[in-house]
Each structure stands twice: as C-alpha cells, then as structure tokens.
Amino acid sequence: MNTATTERYRETAARALSDPILKNALKGLQDRLGKGALEAYRHLPEGEGLRHLAHDIRMHHVEHLDRLLDTLSRNIEARGGKVFFAPDAASAAEYVVQLARRHAVRSVVKGKSMTSEEVGINTALEAEGIPVTETDLGEFIIQLAGESPSHIIAPAIHKTREDVGRLFESHLGIPFTNDPPTLTRAARNHLRARFLAADMGITGCNLACAETGQIALVSNEGNIRMATTLPRIHVAIMGMERVCATIDEQLLLLRLLSRGASAQKMGGYVSFLAGPKRDGFWDGPEEFHVVVLDNGRSRILADPVFREVLCCIRCGGCLNVCPVYARIGGHSYGYAYCGPIGAVVTPLLTDIERSKHLFCGETLCGACRDVCPVAIDLPRMLLALRQVHAEGSPRWNVQPKPSLERFGYDIWAWVMTHPKAYQALLHGMHVLWPLLRRLPVPGWTPYRKLPKSFGG
C-alpha cells in the first residue's frame, strides 16, 4: 500500500519553494487550466447552476451508496464481470496479486489511476516479479524517474523537456533530444510493445453507473483503450464513492469532469466498459474485474461533517487554482492525493494528527470551491479539520490540545464583546507592543507592525 509521508510536509514544501522550474511549470498550468475551467463553466448551455445541480446529485449518490453499489455489483456480474469489495488497500492489492498468480500473468500495463497509487499496486505486483508499465505518458516519465505523481491529471508537470530527454536516453537507449514530438514517438514505440505483450491491464474508474453496470474512463492519449482491450484480463480499481445512479447522471458528470480537469467540453477518449468481450467480438478482455475500495471511506461516509468530500470526481481542478499548490507542488503533500482535495481527504483516509500541516497550510481563499465542477465546499471542511485537531474527536481518535493560543483567543473573544475593555486595550497597546514583538512566535511577531489605530 501507499506509505504516507504527510508529517514531512513542511520540510518538502520548503524545498519546493526554492525550485524555480517547478514554480514556472505550475504557473503555466494554472494560467491555462485554472482560468480555462472557469471560462468553460461560463459557456455551459445550462449555465453555471449545473455545478450546483451536480453537487446535489453527488450528495444523493453518497447518501445512498449501499444501494447503488449493490445494484452496480449485480449488473456487472450479470454481464459476466466480477466484483470484489476491498475493505482496505492491502486486501485490494492482494486480490490483484492473487488474480495475477492464478492466471500466470507475466507483465501488466496500467492506465493512470490515483486509486491504484493509494493501494500501491505497482509495488505489490513487482514484489511478485511481475513488471508493471505505466502507459499514460506523464506516468511513464515519472515511473522511469522513480518518482510519484505531482498532479492528479498532469503527473509529470515538474519535469522539463531536458529531464525527459535524459530519462529516455538512459532508459530507452535513444540519443538525447528535447524535441517533444521525437520524445513522444519514442515513448509510443516503447509502449506499443508493452501493450502487445501484457497479460493484464489495470485502470482506475472515473465514474461507474449502477443502472447499466458499466464504468467510464476518460483520457486524452488513447492509452486507456489499449490497456483495457488488448490484455486478456482487465482490472479496474475504484473508490467506493465513484458510482452514479443513472447513465444520464454519469454523462452530466463526465461533461463537468472534463471542464474542471482540462477546460475541455469532453476528454479526447471516453470509454464505457461493461464486462468481458462477448461472442463474436475480436477485442476486449477475457475477464473483467472491478475492485471497489473502501480504505477509510466508510468512516468518512459516517461523518456528516466530512461526507461531502466523497462527492469529489478527482478532476484536479482545485489544484489548478490553489495558490498553495502553485508554490509547493504535489510531492509536498506526501500521499496519493495533493492540493486542496488532498489537504482534506488525506488526513481523513490516513491520520489527522500526522497530516495536520496539510489542512493548516491552506489559505481558505475559496478558489477551490469556485472551480470545483460539483461545487464541493473544501474551505468549510478544512476549517472543520482544524477544529477537530484543536478540540479533539473520539470518532477520529484525536485528543484535544491544551493550548495557550486557545486561551488567548478566549480572552480576545471576551474583549471583543465588551466595548470598554476593547477601548482600554487599544489605548494600552502602544505601551505593550515592544514587549509583544519579543514573544517567541516564529514567523509571526517579528514581521508584524502595530496598526496605526492601535497607537503605534
């Protein structure tokens, strides 16, 4: 399974802040996709209110997950597919490994999937001597570099053309070049042989439809279709929340997903998959497996404060407008999910105490809420996580913190509701300020000046 390193957030973020290449790459991404998504919403035929309708639809899905997943499972199996409900990442990985052993799988090709990153499926298979090849170009690049994704839809955004050229020279045996078409052609030639040789294809699932028993996958490269039709076994790993009730709702959400992710009306390739190939068809897998992953999602579902985060369809739009992500990139977050969505979902899936810097590091500017295709209120949940961390929660195994800061805010709240005390404080601040500036609050008091209204 994926090992979280969220406690190193401040350390890795500090290094990222001094990386000018990363900063320029992320600025370009935000200028293109962040602003583009907002513009794309403005041109929706139904108007921007469609996002709020989508929010209501997704909340309905979340609140009826048990019935939707049961219907989805029955309809997949009716088409000849198999469904496994994995309570945690380890059981999901073990299911895939056992399946590979049973069918003597020698090699695997994989489409980009953040859920498989959460499960750590590559590591599990490679420990069994089964090589896994990432087929999304960005994922392929970072796999060669031995790194993890730094963005949900642009995993290699932190790499330059020169970086890619050196990687391909070293691993693919081609002369160094930084020409994108040449590099793309080299990757295509290399991956084509992997597609033809693979026994198993692994993907994620953008959205599943309970009504039809199908999953939908969106890409702009076509690699997903190769990974799902050429190998004899296809395994899709999906978070349990990624299910819709009807195909009409699925199509509506796919439209919004493409706009939020890449400011497109629809992704270049949208595949609907519903079981193994039927008689008379030449392509498609002989076996179709869907692994439905819990791994902490049931606990989120049980909490009315945080269950809204399960509405997320992982478009990555919030990363493309977040001022914090724009400066520190995805690796700082220390888990499969980064940016504002990672700052909420990662602590809930892993450990709030270990991941406290993620939700405390966000600005609460609200840009993530404005760009979300399903209008999720991430700032509200970031604040709620801060409250849980400070005040404690038996549900989340968090102990309340004895805090001088909290005591100070209690005093401040009392002063703000008593005018005479407030006026006395204003008049006394010019005397106290030189002393207050010497208080040991790193990163705060040494850089603050007394407002003129305080008499400074």
Image (cartoon, grey):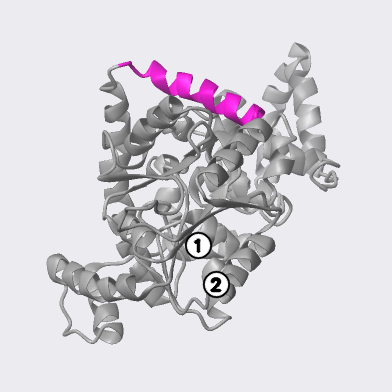
Name the one closer to the observer, 300 or 213. 213
Q: Is residue 118 left or right of residue 107?
A: right
Q: Position of residue 414 (x, y in %)?
A: 80, 21
Which range is magenta?
Answer: 46-64
Label 2 – label 1 distance at C-alpha: 41 Å
Residue 127: which quarter of the image?
bottom right
Q: What kind of element bears circle 1?
A: helix
The amino acid pointed to by label 2 is: Ala
Q: Residue at x 56, y 65 (%)?
A: 11
User: Is residue 370 magenta-colored?
Assistant: no
**As displayed, is residue 70 above or below residue 1?**
above
Question: Hey, which quadrant is residue 259 in on the image?
Answer: top left
Up/down of 140 relative to 373, above or below: below
Q: Which residue is mark 2?
A: 100
Label located before the other in sequence (2 or 1): 1
Residue at position x 58%, y 29% in the image: 61
Quadrant, the C terminus? top right
**Residue 262 rendering spot, x and y as whole percentages:** 30, 42
Q: Quadrant of the N terminus?
A: bottom right
* Relative to 285, 35 lies left or right: left
Q: Is residue 146 visible?
A: yes
Residue assigned mark 1: 14
**Residue in view at x 68 percent, y 64 percent:** 90
